[in-house]
Image (spheres, rainbow, N blue to C red):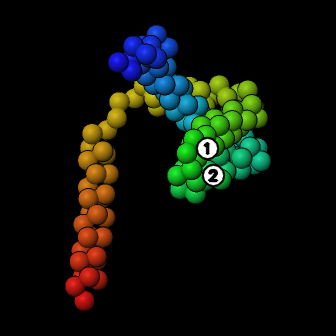
């Protein structure tokens, strides 16, 4: 009934939105890798390297300018600041470095993931979870 009243299916197709978001996320991943490889290149100036580090630190940091629990605005800073920071770093990278970083980023995205390394990471997380559980058990028991 809600679908008939508001004609939700006519507004957008969920599959199209999903495909668009997947394409956007893949592009952002490639651009983030491009910034990573460009920042590691010795031909990149220290100021651009510092900016790349700040953008990456903000993207990976659990501390945001606007906390994520605030509806809409909490995620809006992540959706705007990180892509804008990546775009700024990309504009400041010299052309020869950009070409080299693009080749490296493309090769990295086409490379298949390592199942062995994924298993190692899962084991590390399980070990950390187990240690935390053991510590909590001993702390609560005492």
Q: Is residue 15 left or right of residue 72?
A: left
Q: Can you name the residue that lies furthest to the bottom here?
A: 142
- The reply, left or right, for residue 37 in relation to residue 138 is right
Callout 2: few (<14), some (14-19), or many (20+) C-alpha neighbours within 10 Å?
few
**Spot occupied by residue 55 in the image (x, y as percentages of width and height):** 65, 46
Task: Pick the quarter of the image with the N terminus.
Answer: top left
Q: Which disc number belongs to residue 73?
A: 1
Residue visible at 63% across and 52% down in the picture: 66
Front position in the image: 58 or 69 = 69
Helix, strand or loop at mark 1: helix
Q: Which residue: 52% across, 52% down?
A: 69
Q: Secondary structure at mark 2?
A: loop
Hey, which quadrant is residue 95 in on the image? top right
Identify the residue at image location x=62%, y=28%. 100
Marks 2/1 in contact by CB < 8 Å: the verdict is yes
Residue holding disc 2: 66
The percent position of residue 114, horizontal first and vertical second, equals 31, 38
Question: Residue 34: which numbered mark, if any?
Answer: none
Quadrant in which residue 83 is drawn: top right
Distance (Cα) linking label 2 and label 1: 7 Å
Q: Position of residue 15 (x, y in %)?
A: 40, 16
Looking at this view, is 141 or 132 the one in front?
Answer: 141
Q: Earlier in the sequence, mark 2 or mark 1?
A: 2
Measured along the vertical axis of the image, is residue 2 above or below residue 132? Answer: above
- Residue 31 in view of the camera: yes
Q: Residues within 10 Å of mark 1 (few under 14, many from 20)?
A: few
Residue 53 relative to residue 16: left or right = right
């Amino acid at each position: 009934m809600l679908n008939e009243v508001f004609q939700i299916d006519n507004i957008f197709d969920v599959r199209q939105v999903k495909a668009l978001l997947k394409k956007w996320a893949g592009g952002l991943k490639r651009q983030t890798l491009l910034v990573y490889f460009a920042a590691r290149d010795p031909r990149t100036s220290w100021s651009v390297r510092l900016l790349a580090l700040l953008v990456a630190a903000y993207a990976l940091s659990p501390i945001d300018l606007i906390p994520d629990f605030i509806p809409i605005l909490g995620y809006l800073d992540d959706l705007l600041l990180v892509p804008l920071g990546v775009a700024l770093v990309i504009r400041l990278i010299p052309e020869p470095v950009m070409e080299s970083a693009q080749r490296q980023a493309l090769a990295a995205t086409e490379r298949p993931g390592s199942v062995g390394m994924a298993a190692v990471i899962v084991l590390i997380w399980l070990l950390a979870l187990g240690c935390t559980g053991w510590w909590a058990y001993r702390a609560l028991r005492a």
